[in-house]
Image (cartoon, rainbow, N blue to C red):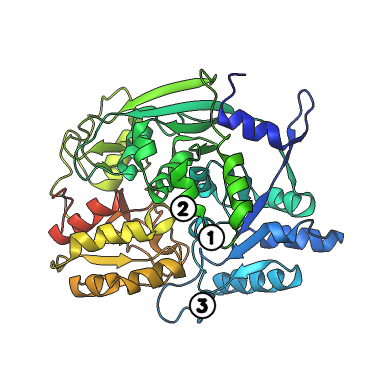
Amino acid sequence: MNLNIIDKIWANHVVEQKENFPNILYIDKILLHEVTSSQAFDELEARGIPIRNPQSIIATIDHSIPTDSNRENIKDPIAKIQVDTLRVNAKKFNIKLYDINSSHQGIVHVIGPELGFTTPGATIICGDSHTATHGAFGALAFGVGTSEIGHALASSCILEYKPKTFKVEFIGTPKANFTSKDAILKLIATIGIGGAQGYIIEYTGSYIQSLSMEQRMTICNMSIECGARSGLIAPDETTFNYLNGKEYVAKGDKFAQDVERWKRLVSDNNAKYDKQITIDITDSAPYITWGINPEHAISLDSKTPSLTDARYDQETLKKAYSYTQLEPNSSLLGVKIDYAFIGSCTNGRIEDLRVVANVLKGSKIAKHVTMIIVPGSEQVLLQAQKEGLDTIFKNAGADFRLPGCSMCLAMNPDHVPPGKRCISSTNRNFIGRQGANSITHLASPYTVAISAINGCIAIK
């Protein structure tokens, strides 16, 4: 049939299709958090509409929750209303809420996979742009607006035009300490922030197949940063081994049957795509952003672009250099940092924390650097404590906090102060993203940790 995996999953979920009209697409699973769900619940209650499949929904608190030891005391009145409202709605509508101290509270895109709520072949939505993270499991996952959340709560369906398909193949062997975060930054730098607009990406190649599930989640997480509607990776033995035994996954013979079904979720030989590209990562060094969007990324063995670089809009270039206080045609190595942040739905999982601990062990963070490390979930927190990673962080001088979105976005108490420069394992470096007039450089957990020790952007 020459069908790719995206076409297959989409076709399996189309309830009705009419010409010149969006598909009615069945949604298997819904993830909720405190920021984008309340209006949807209000609408359903006002119209007397029940939730169709409450068992297909889970919720957690992540964006607004403080990550210090006193997170029960939410001082921001808006954040407190958001959290309290989700608690009330979850109870009222019989939805499973993973609240703080439930052992599974955390960033919605971290707890979904670790619970096994995320499974191959499923359609998954959330009122959050980084829902593409779940595509690492061969799921079709994308962020939607609050009104669409309401539609799905009421009917298990949304209206959606089918995006085009985009095959991205990674080839080659990169340099040491090049990670999946660097791979996705290289893709975004290559095709631009609008390079995949209107598409769903399938990531392929031997490099992708070699990655762990957590590394694959990092790749898919940032699909949105090059404009894609979503991104996914075909499931394989790595996927099945990760899911085996998870809370929401079937057990015994039923799990074996599911695996046999999931094995069919692969693109056919000579499958057709609307667009294809090959990204050669041979001898690639780690990547880092220098500007004001994820497209502004370079390898750490190269220099920032000139003001006449044809790849970029000239006004944006000038604005970026003015904001970041950097110069064209210069190396980022040695640029002084004030903050270092590890966390987020991009790089807040246990493997990320292990990388950071390996770098920090026996070393001290530079005296002028504030380093904050935030686990992506309570399970990540508990595992880090079990392995003694928290002690390594403390001995190095880092602040190891409680789960939440934290310093990824200026929506909670964890901000980068005005004028300060932060190297961050997060997904966006927009102006003011981590705090008003703050400067953000996106990088991998390894690069963040090694830079925290050096007190400046560094690779070793």
Location of mark 2 (residue): 242
In the displayed structure, 417 sits above or below 196; it is: below
Whether residue 249 is visible here, answered yes or no, is no
Location of mark 3 (residue): 101
Location of mark 1 (residue): 246
In the displayed structure, 1 sits above or below 341; it is: above
| Mark 1 neighbour density, 10 Å: few (under 14) some (14–19) many (20 or more) | some
224 sits to left or right of 123: left
- Tell me which numbered mark, 1 or 3, is placed earlier along the sequence: 3
Q: Nearer the viewer, mark 2 or mark 3?
A: 2
Examine the image and state in which quarter residue 277 appears: top left
Q: x%, y% of residue 138?
A: 53, 41
Q: x%, y% of residue 12?
A: 69, 35
* Three-letter residue code for mark 2: Tyr
Badge 1 vs badge 2, beta-carbon distance below 8 Å: yes
- Which element carries disc 3, helix, strand or loop? loop
Q: Looking at the image, which residue sits at the far front?
A: 253
C-alpha gap between disc 1 and disc 3: 19 Å
381 sits to left or right of 52: left
* Three-letter residue code for mark 3: Asn
- Which element carries disc 1, helix, strand or loop? loop
Name the residue rendered at 37%, 64% in the picture.
415
C-alpha gap between disc 1 and disc 2: 8 Å
| Front in this rendered view, residue 128 or 305 | 128
Q: x%, y% of residue 326?
A: 21, 43
- Which element carries disc 2, helix, strand or loop? helix
